[in-house]
Image: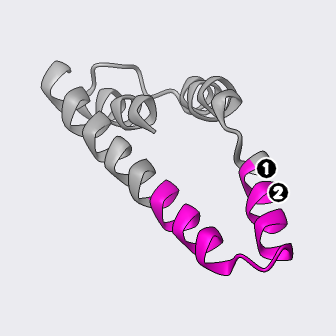
Amino acid sequence: CLLGGMLIAAVSSGGLHSDSRVYALLATGFLGGFSTFSTFVLDIFSVTERGNWRRAWGALLLVWALSLLAAAAGLALGSFLF
């Protein structure tokens, strides 16, 4: 998320050529390769199957909040650098 925010800042500032193919390759191909979203969803599902809904919601909210914060930090850092 941090790198994705930096990528968005680089493209929007003109620091990186905004060819849609390059952006798609970097954003979804390279950075998307670091994503373990399917494993995360499976873990949340298995926690809910055991009846621990509180832990599942806590994990969901924590991961979403940290992801948004990392993206915002990447955007700010990228805006500063580019």
Residue that numbered label 1 is attached to: 38
Q: Is residue 82 above or below residue 20?
A: above
- Magenta part of the chain: 40-64
- Is 51 in the magenta? yes
> Looking at the image, which is closer to me, 34 or 48?
48
Q: Residue 44's quadrant in the figure?
A: bottom right
- Is 48 in the magenta? yes
Q: Is residue 33 above or below residue 8?
A: above
Position in image of residue 49 (x %, y %): 86, 74
**Disc 2: CA contacts within 10 A as few (<14), some (14-19) or many (>=20):** few
Q: CA distance from mark 2 to mark 1?
A: 6 Å
Q: Which mark is residue 57?
A: none
Mark 2 or 1, closer to the camera: 2
Please give left or right for residue 10 compared with residue 29 in the image.
left
Position in image of residue 32 (x %, y %): 65, 34
Q: Residue 29's quadrant in the figure?
A: top right
| Residue that appears at 78% across and 47% down | 39
Q: Please name the amino acid that badge 1 sits on.
A: Ser
| Residue that appears at 44% across and 49% down | 67
Q: Please name the amino acid that badge 2 sits on.
A: Leu
Residue that numbered label 2 is attached to: 42
Q: Residue 55's quadrant in the figure?
A: bottom right
> Looking at the image, which is closer to me, 51 or 16?
51
Q: Is residue 34 above or below residue 64?
A: above
Dominant SS in magenta? helix
* Marks 2 and 1 close (CB-CB < 8 Å): yes
Badge 2 marks a residue whose secondary structure is helix
| Residue that appears at 78% across and 74% down | 48
Quadrant in the picture for the C terminus: top left
